[in-house]
Image (cartoon, grey):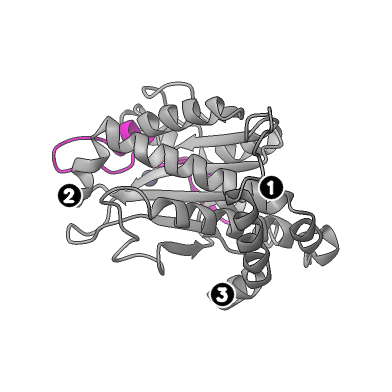
Amino acid sequence: MRNSRRAALLSSALVLFSISAVGFATGEYAGASKLPLAGVTIAIDPGHNGGNATYPWTIGRLVDAGGFWKACDTAGTVTLSGYPEHAFAWALSLTLGADLKAAGAKVVLTRTNDHGVGPCIDERAAIGNRVHADLAISLHGDGGPSWGRGFEVIEPGVSISRRNDDRPILIRSYVLGAALRDALQSVPQLVPSTYLGESGIGLRTDLGGLNLSKVPKVLLEVCNLRNSADAGLADSPAWRQEVALALVSGIERYRAAVRSPTTTSTLSPTTSTTGS
Ligand SMILES: [Zn+2]
């Protein structure tokens, strides 16, 4: 899918999103006894795993990534001072998971520790699918050029197999991506990527974890771990908490948008373009 199609799919949803976001900000939940994310299931996928580098044959085996074969996973990147991406993703996922639970959500993680191997990218998507997650988010730190900074929210395009050519799910993923991008702007010292995507958002069709998802999903490169300034932020628990709280806020705004009756009719399956 080209960026222009993504823009076309998103444009009508964004209008409705901004309307409902205003409604939320003016007190949609005022007086409600329920927590904002009660009844919502969220799959968090902490990128990579601590044991991946030790088992290259296991992690290098090929799996279906959405109509093509790709390595099960990789070891991920590492900062210049030695803080590994898998540890960053794991720490941020635990913080985010705790914050989401405090907001009432049910949280499912795709791995249970930071010293194992895998799971593979196809299984990471399957975990979110099996629990019928309302949304899924994969957390990574990029290994970009040392001069580049910032976050990129990566959204799914239609994979070569077209198995994920499901307009309601894609639109929800784009609404989720926009909500998270907007929320992340409030995180101290974090900027939209200076070298990836456009205004903090990119679209990819080569990521199995997105191609195989049957629930709204985005992959977040939280910052560039190969940039010394971003790496310093990533290594700070206080800064990771800022990121987590911004993501919770973005997720709440996303939920408010898709629960709006007007938005729901726009996202109904009757608009599906599934062709194979
Ligand atoms: Zn990664």
Q: Secondary structure at mark 2?
A: helix
Helix, strand or loop for the magenta stretch, by majority: loop
Q: Secondary structure at mark 3?
A: loop
What label does residue 214 carry, if any? 1
Badge 3 is on which residue?
Answer: 2
Badge 2 is on which residue?
Answer: 229
Residue sitting at x 57%, y 78%: 4
6 and 60: which one is in front? 6
Q: Residues within 10 Å of mark 3 (few under 14, many from 20)?
A: few
Q: Which residues are magenta?
A: 60-89
Q: Quadrant of ligand 1?
A: top left
- Apparent side of residue 55 relative to residue 41 in the rendered image (left or right): left
Q: Is residue 37 visible?
A: yes
Query: In the rendered structure, are the residues bearing label 3 and label 2 in contact, judged by CB atoms less than 8 Å apart?
Result: no
Residue sitting at x 81%, y 66%: 271
| Residue 58 placement (x, y as % from top left) | 43, 32
Please state which amino acid type lies under the numbered disc 2: Ala
Report the quarter where the C terminus lies. bottom right
| Residue 138 placement (x, y as % from top left) | 49, 43
- Apparent side of residue 131 relative to residue 202 in the rendered image (left or right): right
Q: Secondary structure at mark 1?
A: loop
- Apparent side of residue 122 relative to residue 91 in the rendered image (left or right): right
